Image: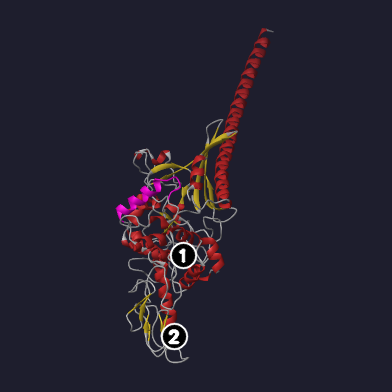
Amino acid sequence: MRQARGSVVVVVVWSVAIAAVMVAATQIVSYRQAVVGRESLARVEARWAARAGLEQMIALMEFHAAAPNPDDPLAVVRDMEEMALGEVATGTWSISHFNDGVEWAGPRDEGAKLNVNVATRAQLANIPGMSPDVVDAIVDWRDTNDNVEGLGAESDYYTNRSMGYRPRNGPFRSLAEVELVAGCWPKYLRGEDWNLNGRLDPNEDDGPRSFPDDKPDGRLDAGWSQYLTAVSRQSPMSLSGNEKFRLGGADPDTLMKATGVDDAQAKALIAWAGQGSNRPEMLLATPLSQLASGQQGQGSGARGGSGNARGGSGGGGAGGASLGTGAESGGARSGGSARTGGGAAGGSGAAGGQQGTSGRSSGGGGAGTGADGRAAVRDLDAAQLRGILREASNDNFAQRVQGRVNINTAPAALLKDVMQIDPRVADAIVARRNSSPRGIVSIADLQGMSGLTPALLTQIAQQCDVTSSVYTVTSRGRSASTGAEVEIEAVVDRSTYPATIVSYRER
């Protein structure tokens, strides 16, 4: 009897022990599942917090596209900076980027970089660490032929090395694509910014403790990627919210209404812009009255000879003339003598004046009366010039137009070192834009700046703008429950309405 009782006790003890083990195992499994579920829920919370930040930025871009302020090109940038930090019920978001090694709130302006698809050889060569063979290889990748340029590389190079791809022979579609070019190693393109998110992550600021190698100095050295972009584009919409028009084919009434020019100025602008490759930016270097007198020299210099015959020489060059009985040149008429027009801008003589009695007349700048009695075209004032640069363009927006550099956000190093703008002029430009929260409203506002010649100003205007249409939003969401983080990086193009998400990735 006692032996039976002892056996029962042993069985009970073992049963309790086994039950305890099973309960403990169940608790452990349940706890782990709960932890996994909690982390999964936290990541969902962080993801939607990050997405809320992205949607906030898109909403601001669309608001400023629908209600633009032509006198404040940086309004959208300021508003996005103010909303760079935010929260929702289950988490928070933060949006920032590094520019010239320093952290800034808000999305990254792709216009603050040089577009690799339009960068010149000289500009590419000015990027620190870029060798001549890499420059030529980049040009070979984006051009439309298979002719090797200098030390570059075309299809044969990639095929012979079994790389599995060939040059696109077209524009780069992303900055990461540049790494496919011969000699463009990731360590040069990315620098410390190994994930190309434009932010200084912990592993990018810890020295040799983790990949990649970096300097733990609190600054982001992004290699070539801090100078180059492949996604910037020119917007077909002006700062006033109107669609840009081609100056050469514009309607005079539309031109007058949009820019404030008078009828004579409008007709002169349209005639001048329709000649060859003339662009609105050239108006920064030459007064309209001189350009108009040059057009008169071109038009009338082609008409000459005797009676109703058309012939003779002439044109828009310097001193272009048409000789013959009853010849008409430079806007002057003569019954029996020859007249010579100052076809080129800046020709000799006073505005619309005449010289001597031999019938030689010469056009010039300024307002007044032309040699044929017609009123000379007035020069553009500052407001009219700003309006033309804002509303008019010679770009064909039926196709993608690669972006210019935003002079309001481009770092000084890009202006000085890569674009080779005189350091004193570059510093003056940076000081000018920093002196007002609106920045530089128009490239025309740089006229008269010390050291900035009309020719240099025209070159800057052809490569730069005062606003941008493409931004990279790197939104980092953080869960309120566990602190889990999710990062969303999206390239947003606000040149369309509604805005377009060009690329999107989460990590």
Q: Of helix, strand and loop, which one carries label 1?
A: loop
The image position of residue 198, as x and y in percent, is: 44, 46
Q: Which residues are magenta?
A: 422-439
Asked if residue 128 shows in the view, the reply is no
Give, as a three-letter code, the residue at label 1: Arg
Q: Looking at the rendering, which quadrant does residue 52 occupy?
A: top right
The image position of residue 492, as x and y in percent, is: 53, 51
The image position of residue 201, as x and y in percent, is: 43, 40
In this picture, is 328 found above or below 375? below
At label 1, counting other C-alpha atoms closer than 10 Å, the crowd grade (few under 14, some 14-19, many 20 or more) is some
- Check residue 423 for magenta coloring: yes
Q: What is the distance, in whole Å, between disc 2 and disc 1 at their CAs?
A: 50 Å
Is 343 situated left or right of 391 in this image?
left
Dominant SS type (magenta):
helix
Q: Which residue is mark 2?
A: 303
In this picture, is 84 found above or below 410? above
Q: Of helix, strand and loop, which one carries label 2?
A: loop
Of marks 2 and 1, the one in the foreground: 2
Asked if residue 396 shows in the view, the reply is yes
Q: Nearer the viewer, residue 216 or 456?
A: 456
Q: Nearer the viewer, residue 168 or 208?
A: 168
Q: Nearer the viewer, residue 254 or 65?
A: 254
- Check residue 77 for magenta coloring: no
The disc placed on residue 168 is 1
Q: Looking at the rendering, which quadrant does residue 141 occupy?
A: bottom left
On-image quarter of the N terminus: top right
Is 217 situated left or right of 79 in this image?
left
Q: Residue at x 33, y 83 (%)?
A: 357
Q: Residue at x 43, y 75 (%)?
A: 295
The image position of residue 18, as x and y in percent, is: 62, 21
